[in-house]
Image (cartoon, rainbow, N blue to C red):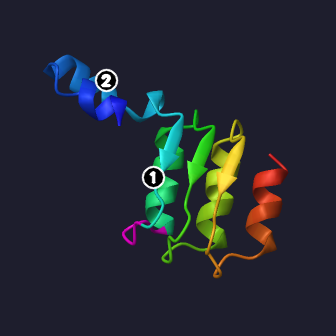
């Protein structure tokens, strides 16, 4: 939210705000366009993520979460309420990093 406000200041700040390497917290909850492919792209571009919320994201699987966990070793908080399609495999992958 703050980043979006800051991005309106000038082009330089907008470019900084859109640079994945600065993203630490992501709230992707209830966004149906979130897929395994998107999680993999995010993880490849932003290994600094410490907090992610994927609650109610129905189009992701254990595969996407495992890639995210592997590529984001600093992940400290992982929220996935109402993601019945995910199994213990996802939780184990996140917890073991």
Residue 33: within the magenta? yes
Gap in Å between the C-alphas at discs 1 and 2?
18 Å
Mark identifier at residue 83: none
* 68 to 9, vertically: above or below: below
Which residue corresponds to the image point at 58% horizontal and 49% vertical from the top-left?
Answer: 52
Is residue 39 visible to us here? yes
Image point 34% across, 30% down: which residue? 3
12 or 56, which lies in front?
Answer: 56
| Residue position for label 1 | 41
Q: Estimate the x, y position of residue 61 in percent, counting from the top left.
A: 60, 74
Q: Are marks 1 and 2 in contact (CB under 8 Å)?
A: no
Which quadrant of the figure contains the C terminus?
top right
Q: Which residue lies under the disc numbered 2? A: 16
Range of residues picked out in magenta: 31-35
Which residue is drawn at the image coordinates 43% and 65% (left, top)? 34
* Marked residue nearer the N-terminal end (1 or 2): 2
Q: Can you say whether 12 is above or below 39 in the image?
A: above
């Amino acid at each position: 939210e703050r980043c979006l406000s800051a991005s309106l200041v000038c082009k330089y700040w907008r470019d900084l705000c859109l640079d994945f390497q600065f993203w630490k917290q992501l709230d992707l909850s209830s966004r149906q366009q979130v897929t395994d492919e998107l999680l993999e792209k995010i993880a490849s571009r932003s290994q600094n993520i410490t907090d992610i919320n994927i609650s109610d994201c129905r189009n992701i699987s254990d595969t996407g979460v495992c890639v995210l966990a592997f590529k984001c070793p600093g992940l400290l908080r992982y929220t996935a309420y109402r993601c019945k399609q995910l199994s213990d495999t996802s939780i184990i992958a996140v917890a073991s990093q």
